Image (spheres, rainbow, N blue to C red):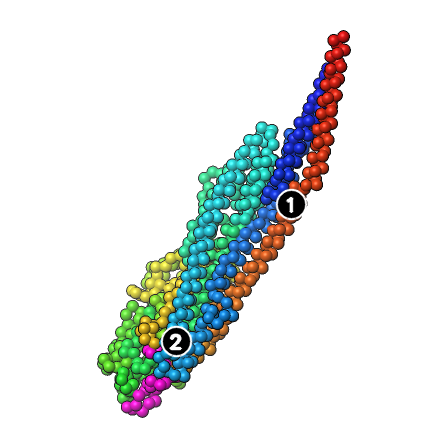
Amino acid sequence: MSSINQILNSASSGLYTAQTGISVVSNNVANINTTGYVTEQLNQTSTASGGVGTGVDGQSITLAANQYLQNASLGASADSGAASIISNMLTQAQGLFGDPGQTGSYLNQLSQVFTDFSSVATNPSSGVSSTQAVQDLSQFLNQSGAIASSLSQLGGQADSQIGADVTTANQLLGQIAQLNSNIIATQGAGESVADTQNTQNQLINQLSSLMDVKASTGANGAVTLRSTTGATLVGVGGAATISYTPVAGAASQVQIVQPGGSQSAIPLTVGSGEIGGLLTLRNSQLPGISAQLSSYVTGAVNAINQASNAASSVPPPSTLTGSNIGIDLTTAVSGFTGDTNIAVLNSSTGVVQQQITVDFTNETMTDASGAVTNFTPSTFLSSLNSALGGTATASFNNGVLSIAAQTGSGVAIQDSSITPSANAAGTGFSQYFGLNNLITSSATTNYNTGLTASSTDGFTAGGTISLQLTGANGVALTNETVTMPAGSTMQDVLNSLNSTSNGVGLYGQFALSSTGQMTFNAYTPGTSVSVLSDNTQWGSNGASLSGLFGLGGAQQASTAGSYQVRADIAANPSLLQTATLNLSAAAGQAALLIGDGSGATALSNAGSTQVSFGAAGIQSATTTTATQYGSLLGGSIGDQASAASQANSNATAVQSEANSQLQSVEGVNLDQELVKLTTYQQAYSASARLVTATQDMFTALMGMIGQ
């Protein structure tokens, strides 16, 4: 009887194992198109008792997993997720600038403005030409602001998507960790965990499109997930919690609280995946494009204002009101050399009533009669008012210089043709103070301050500026708070900024260029500076350190949307600066003529004026014309979008190949499953026949006993 029982047990185990195998094959075939599904395989082992075979054990079902190929696929998925979102958003950014091949596109508008100025020069008294020029200039400035705003919105869109992706990632991490608990418990009970592991693999695949992960499976069947830098995402202690809080105007990054114990939040480097791509966009690429746009617009504005400040409307304006220079008058004047002429003219006849020649080199003011007034930088304003003799009044309030003529008169300014006035930045007197700007701004936009290391430090001692240092990968390196010293020169400010203990000295050096622009020279290429907060101030009502020098990409990017045509000219285009002051006119003759188009000619030539553009985005510092820089801008953005598109195609191809390699090992193969199914069916039939034979033997045996 024991032998019959052994045969029956063997047959029964064979039936059960074959049934299980058929079920596994059925499950595999049903999931042939399920993304991330790993083929399940039945592991069979023979059983024995007392050295005698008792059948087969077919309860062990495992996955045909390959850890190396799986991680390669996860990495390819993350790279594809990053490349896809970068390509998508850079294509949107490129679309904001329009098609350079179309006449009315944004990148062609500035050339049209200079063409308009040329038309005005041909017929300066034509109101139609002046109106068209002012309208086209306004359109260029308005669209510049609109593009800047749209780029900012793309950055906000990236922030929102990162937040949504982080929420999804946390949900996936929690689900993966919960499945780990189920797997450990199920495997401990001796049951199959293959289906649960397959479900878990699909969640991991979803997670990999959001962020880069590495997976490893332990002996207990549970998976451990880590970032590429080694941070634990899912482990023995459960799931990590990641978070994201964007920082305006500075690099932002994901934080992680790793599982297990009382962990504190630390930065998490997300190198790829959609989250990584979005971080690269909002921390580096979009701010870079915004900075290039602002550099372009500011360069064009400076070239146009340089021309307008050397010209005048006819009749001349009764008041010239400058822009906020951000520093005190004494410091500003002390940086000038050369000569400039300030003329007060009769508004109706254009005849000069008073002319003051200011010699900054020798610190003298000479009127038309030859009377000389000496001055120092600290007495410049009072000396100028004295020299003007009541024909006009100069004032300086809140960083703005203004010269107002008496009733019935106007003011015009012209530099000497032999020794023109200029500060260290090479900027003339009227242009530096913005006295006759065609284009104005509510912000300080001229970062070529003319200050030198030996210039007086006007920043109030004790004011602080918080700086963030960011690496080329967009990850914050450190935050430093610098306190303004009680020093006497700008070199003292530079020394504080460059301190290795509480400044940026470990990462680079701040310096003043020959034009007075403050630049940061990083020791490691790609390292940049952002401003987190700034309560510094020059004097009682001057500019902050970041505002005066345009520190940080956010400060520079904000300028593109701050420009507009001067209000009185926008309202009355006939006030356009079409003429040039003629100080050689004979006494009693008009020094400003309504038919003079030389000022408009200078405005049209501003398009070919060489302008110094600082480094912005991926564009290095260069000296070129504003129109040529526009071409560089369009080419740069096009190149970035094209490179991103190609990178996306390449990443997609790599992902497809990685998945193909993984599928060849882990995926369901119908031919193999058919072979397995046939084998299990045959095994089932054989076991069934053995059961029948055993039954026949048992019946015969019982019959023999009954006899």
How many tags in the picture?
2
Q: Of the numbered discs in the image, which one, if any, rests on residue 368?
A: none
Quarter location, residue 649: bottom right
Vertical arrangement, residue 442 with respect to residue 604, above or below: above
Q: Is residue 338 something one can see in this rendering?
A: no
Segment colored magenta: 574-598
Q: Mark 1 points at which residue?
A: 663
- Cβ atoms under marks 1 and 2 closer than 8 Å: no
Q: Is residue 536 something one can see in this rendering?
A: yes
Nearest the viewer among 549 and 19 is 19
- Name the residue rendered at 47%, 69% in the picture: 105
Element type at marker 1? helix
Q: In this view, does 654 lie to the left or right of 576?
A: right
Q: Of the numbered discs in the image, which one, if any, rests on residue 132?
A: 2
- Name the residue rendered at 56%, 39% in the picture: 200
Where is residue 213 shown, x and y percent of the image?
55, 46
Vertical arrangement, residue 260 with respect to residue 383, above or below: above
- Name the residue rendered at 30%, 65% in the picture: 541
